[in-house]
Structures are given as structure tokens and as C-alpha cells.
Image: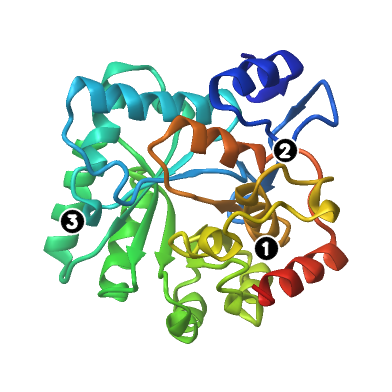
């Protein structure tokens, strides 16, 4: 497979392995959609990988091999961002073990988090994250749920100056926290925010996503499937005929709604399974729904 692109030969091979056909058949070869990080101008592919729960495994040869296959596919198809956290237990170590066995670190955009109280504790946690992840510089360090925000952002800024961290961020995963996150965006001006946004949790579109665009803040989206609730809501229904031009699965339908928002930089569905990774990656290619189609998607899901 050619790095960062899908070809028709890839499609046939992937369909045989997974039974899936990514929605990228409009051209013989095309790159994954990318978005610009406002703070730097660097491009970031729109489909990344979350690791909550699914990378929290023992570092056995079998577990490392299966997660490496998922990461390999992400990179082969042009993705780069992997998001983790010390709160995800063994996830950072599993990523580091894969990095230690390969030469993929330079191709990864590694995002993790700090979630503790006090400057010394934050420094200790971030230092341990870098050690576990087998990296000298973390691409994105995020203050999780704004915990001790001012303290940790000050350290992150210092580490950015020292080239130990490339980008700063602030996260949350609750729609009830959007007002607090907006205040953090105003006071801290982070390079990134990470929030929940989807057809099942659209509240961020009311003001937070436009605010991020106005402030020049990149946006990572978590909970794209609302912890599986969106899949449960559609059940065994077939995709509507009008979605056939941009999606080949419900997963792609849900993900393309998210990345069709111009303020969204990257979405990070979590998976440890290669066939799910393949399906998710399909959303990073081909046509995106326009504003009228987005409204149709919203209306459709509201009736379920």
C-alpha cells in the first residue's frame, strides 16, 4: 500500500480482509483530507486514533502485535494523531512499546494529557508520560478537564520553550462543561481544545466551535459515536440512499458529519480492531456532506 493514499488495488485487498469498502472510490488515488493547525500552519489528517480502554492491555506479544496493526494502518493511509492519557492506565506504555519496536515515532502525532493537582505532580506526570511513550518531545500536551489549569498551562508553556512539548491543549468530554471550556479558551489561548461533538451531542456547534475558529484554536473531537449510542440508535437499518455518495457505513456517516464542520481539525474514534480502523479511515477520503446534507443528517438522527 502506498503511504498516505488509497488505491483501487488497496480497496480490493482491504475488502477481502475486512469485508468493508471504504467510501473512497471516486478516484484511483487520493490523500486523506487534512486540516491546518492555526498556531503553526502544520497540516493534520482528519482521522486519528483514540486509545481509551482499547489500548489498556498488558504488553504481551499478541496485544502489542494487534495494536501495532491498527497503528500501521492509520499511518499507511495518511493518519498520524494518536491520543492517550495517564488516566487510560496502560495505554501510554503500549504505545511506547510499539514505538520501541518500530521506526514509526517520526510519523506519529502523539497527544496525551496531564490530570493532577500541583506543579510538581504535573511535572512528574508529564515526565513519566514522555518516558512511557518513548519520546523526547510530546506533540500535544492537554490539561484534562481543566484540572489545575493555570498551573499546568504555565509548565506546558515552559516545556514548549524548551522543545519538550510542541502544542498546548485543554480537554473535556461533557457538554455541560462547554461554558467552562470557553472561559479557558479565552484566558489561556491554547493551541488545541478537545471536546465532544457528534450527531448525538451537537451542543458545541452553538458557539464553541465558531469561537475556536475565531480564536485560531485547533479542535480534536472525542466521543464521535457517543459511546456507541449512535450505532444502537440506527440498529439494523440500512444507510439512506441519499447518503450513498459520501458514506459506505454508519461509522463513516457519523464521522463525516463531524469532519464536515470547518472548525474541526481531527476526530479520534477509539479502536483496537483493524477492521474498525479501516472503516473509520474511510471517512477521511472522498466527498463530505454540504450544509444542506448536514441538516438532513441531523433531521434523520432526530427521528430515531
Mark 3 or mark 2, earlier in chain? 3
Relative to residue 37, is residue 261 depicted above or below? below
**Comparing marks 1 and 2, which lies closer to the viewer?**
2
* Residue 148 occupies quadrant: bottom left
Q: How far apart in space, not on screen, are marks 1 and 2 (Cα)?
A: 18 Å
Front in this rendered view, residue 279 or 77: 279
Question: In this rendering, would 52 be left or right of 227?
Answer: left
Mark 1 or mark 3, earlier in chain? 3
Residue picked out by circle 2: 285
**Comparing marks 1 and 3, which lies closer to the viewer?**
1
Q: How far apart in space, not on screen, are marks 3 and 2 (Cα)?
A: 39 Å
* Residue 130 occupies quadrant: top left
- Residue 134 visible? The answer is no
Secondary structure beneath label 1: loop
Relative to residue 81, is residue 39 depicted above or below? below
Badge 1 local density, few (<14 within 10 Å), some, or many (20+)?
Answer: many
Residue picked out by circle 3: 123
Question: In this rendering, would 8 be left or right of 187?
Answer: right
Q: Please give the label number shown on residue 263.
A: 1
Amino acid at each position: 500500500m502506498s503511504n498516505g493514499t488509497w488505491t483501487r488495488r488497496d480497496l480490493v485487498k482491504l475488502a477481502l480482509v475486512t469485508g468493508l469498502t471504504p467510501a473512497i472510490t471516486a478516484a484511483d488515488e487520493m490523500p486523506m483530507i487534512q486540516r491546518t493547525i492555526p498556531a503553526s500552519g502544520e497540516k493534520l489528517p482528519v482521522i486519528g486514533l483514540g486509545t481509551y480502554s482499547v489500548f489498556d492491555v498488558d504488553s504481551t506479544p499478541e496485544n502489542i502485535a494487534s495494536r501495532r496493526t491498527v497503528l500501521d494502518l492509520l499511518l499507511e493511509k495518511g493518519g498520524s494523531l494518536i491520543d492517550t492519557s495517564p488516566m487510560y492506565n496502560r495505554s501510554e506504555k503500549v504505545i511506547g512499546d510499539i514505538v520501541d519496536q518500530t521506526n514509526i515515532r517520526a510519523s506519529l502525532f502523539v497527544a496525551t494529557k496531564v490530570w493532577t493537582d500541583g506543579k510538581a505532580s504535573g511535572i512528574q506526570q508529564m515526565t513519566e508520560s514522555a518516558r512511557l511513550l518513548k519520546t523526547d518531545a510530546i506533540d500535544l500536551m492537554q490539561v484534562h478537564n481543566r484540572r489545575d489549569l493555570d498551573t499546568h498551562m504555565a509548565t506546558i508553556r515552559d516545556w514548549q520553550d524548551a522543545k519538550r512539548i510542541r502544542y498546548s491543549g485543554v480537554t473535556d468530554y461533557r457538554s455541560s462543561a462547554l461554558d467552562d471550556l470557553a472561559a479557558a479558551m479565552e484566558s489561556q489561548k491554547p493551541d488545541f481544545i478537545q471536546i465532544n461533538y457528534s450527531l448525538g451531542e451537537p451542543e458545541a456547534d452553538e458557539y464553541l466551535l465558531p469561537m475556536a475558529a475565531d480564536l485560531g484554536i485547533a479542535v480534536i473531537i472525542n466521543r464521535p459515536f457517543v459511546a456507541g449510542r449512535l450505532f444502537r440508535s440506527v440498529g439494523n437499518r440500512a444507510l439512506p440512499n441519499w447518503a450513498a455518495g459520501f458514506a459506505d457505513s454508519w461509522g463513516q456517516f457519523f464521522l463525516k458529519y463531524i469532519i464536515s464542520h470547518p472548525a474541526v481539525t481531527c476526530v479520534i474514534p477509539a479502536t483496537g480492531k483493524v477492521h474498525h480502523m479501516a472503516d473509520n479511515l474511510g471517512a477521511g477520503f472522498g466527498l463530505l456532506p454540504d450544509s444542506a446534507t448536514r441538516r438532513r443528517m441531523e433531521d434523520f438522527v432526530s427521528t430515531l
